[in-house]
Amino acid sequence: MKRIVYREWRIAPERYWGLLAILAVIVGIGGLAALYMEHQGHWVTGMTNSVVWGTPHVFAVFLILSASGALNVASIGSVFGKTEYKPLGRLSGLLAAALLVAGLLVLVLDLGRPDRLVVAMTTYNFSSIFAWNIFLYSGFLVVVIAYLWTMAERKGNHLTQPVGTFAFLWRLALTTGTGSIFGFLVARQAYDTAILAPLFVVMSFAYGLAIYILVLMFSFDWDERPLGPRMLKRLKNLLAIFIASMLYFTLVYHLTKLYGAKNTDVETFLLISGGIYTVMFWFGWILMGNLLPLGILYHPELSKDRNWIAGACGLVIAGGLAAMYVIIIGSQAYPIEMFPGKTVLEFGAPGDIGGEVAPYAPSFPEFLLGLGGVAVALFITAVGVRVLQFLPESLADQVIDPHASVRST
């Protein structure tokens, strides 16, 4: 590999400031939506006593998972010794930090009382998985910053592998903890299974890499930097492996649930009779997020076209949001079985205690808050690559592998 030179993002100022202005407007609208929900109360949202985690949580969990997965690119280069991926490490760390900050910001603003965050940060109940995740999330940011320092500072280069290994283990713990939030909830039948932890780990790999590929392609195209087909081929092949693994764990998750007779009703609800949740499972999670991207990435011709690769990444992201919607909201909407074998009479709003599927329709402010979180991640990334040297000048085949042209002949 030739010596990699890193440079700031040098697109035309009018294009750069225009991009930041668009992102800032979206962030501002998301902030106003959060302020509106905070001032009016959560009755203006679609959430109920049963569905207490709504659309903002869908975006928040997706962004947190993607943050862990985005750092996987850096881990492949420094931890597993794949030198071809080392030029991608800096952007990987920046994107991971940006996605996590954005996800946590949405999460905090959706809690209803974000002003009481200091209480959650100073009073811990270590029997709760939520308390564990506070340390996992904050620690992840510290580890990523240290990881970036070892990659950018010559004096710290010798620490890149040990710090990278520690970061790799930390993000596995983080994603496992996020999946365990749902897996440890025994009250909800669709949760309450340990398989959710490894499922979330594999999901993070796929979602983070899909976002990474799109950001890499966009930033290089706008700055007219060469991105060779060999590097893009490695990334899209890796994404295909992650998608196939995600599909496998999804199958195991539902087969595990179906094996127990007590879960037949909830599985029937999610897979057959759940209305919007069934549609989002089959057409969003499975078709859009798994099968179609796999078909594109393994197609002999389409997999060579950059537009189709970008489209496959977009499908993975859209399918990931659908998957989070089904897992988070669909599982809450299904009525809690308070007393197995008994009928619970409904009182109050539908779905408050049991008996009926809890209604939920995402409100516009909820969607705007989630979209604002996505804009925050992109805003941080855009500022980072403009101010600091996160992007290599070239990822052409001759730079990554100087012998590529010789072997091709």
Image (tube, helix red, strand yellow):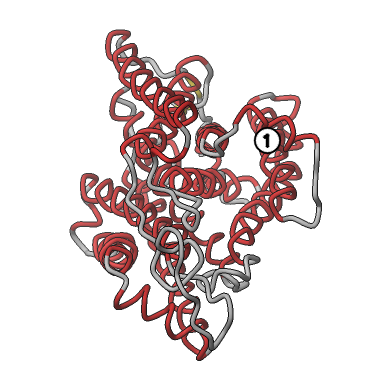
Task: Count up the numbered dots.
Answer: 1
Residue placed at 45% from the left, 74% from the top? 248
Spot occupied by residue 94 in the image (x, y as percentages of width and height) = 54, 31
The answer to whether 210 is drawn above or below residue 223 in the figure is below
Extreme residue toward the left, this view: 301
Determine which residue is flagged by label 1: 147
Query: Observer-nearest residue: 56 or 67?
Result: 56
The answer to whether 325 is drawn above or below residue 183 in the figure is above
The answer to whether 401 is drawn above or below residue 407 in the figure is above
Residue placed at 25% from the left, 57% from the top? 303
Residue placed at 51% from the left, 30% from the top? 4
Q: Amino acid at mark 1?
A: Tyr
Spot occupied by residue 276 in the image (x, y as percentages of width and height) = 28, 63
Spot occupied by residue 150 in the image (x, y as percentages of width and height) = 70, 31
- Classify residue 379 as left or right of residue 162: left
- Classify residue 302 as left or right of residue 380: left
Residue placed at 34% from the left, 19% from the top? 25
Q: Callout 1: 10 Å neighbours few (<14), some, many (20+)?
A: many
The answer to whether 55 is drawn above or below residue 385 in the figure is below
Spot occupied by residue 354 in the image (x, y as percentages of width and height) = 48, 70
Q: Quadrant of residue 154?
A: top right
Q: Quadrant of residue 364?
A: top left
Query: Observer-nearest residue: 134 or 404?
Result: 134
Judging from the image, what secondary structure is the residue with disc 1 in?
helix
Q: Quadrant of residue 319?
A: bottom left
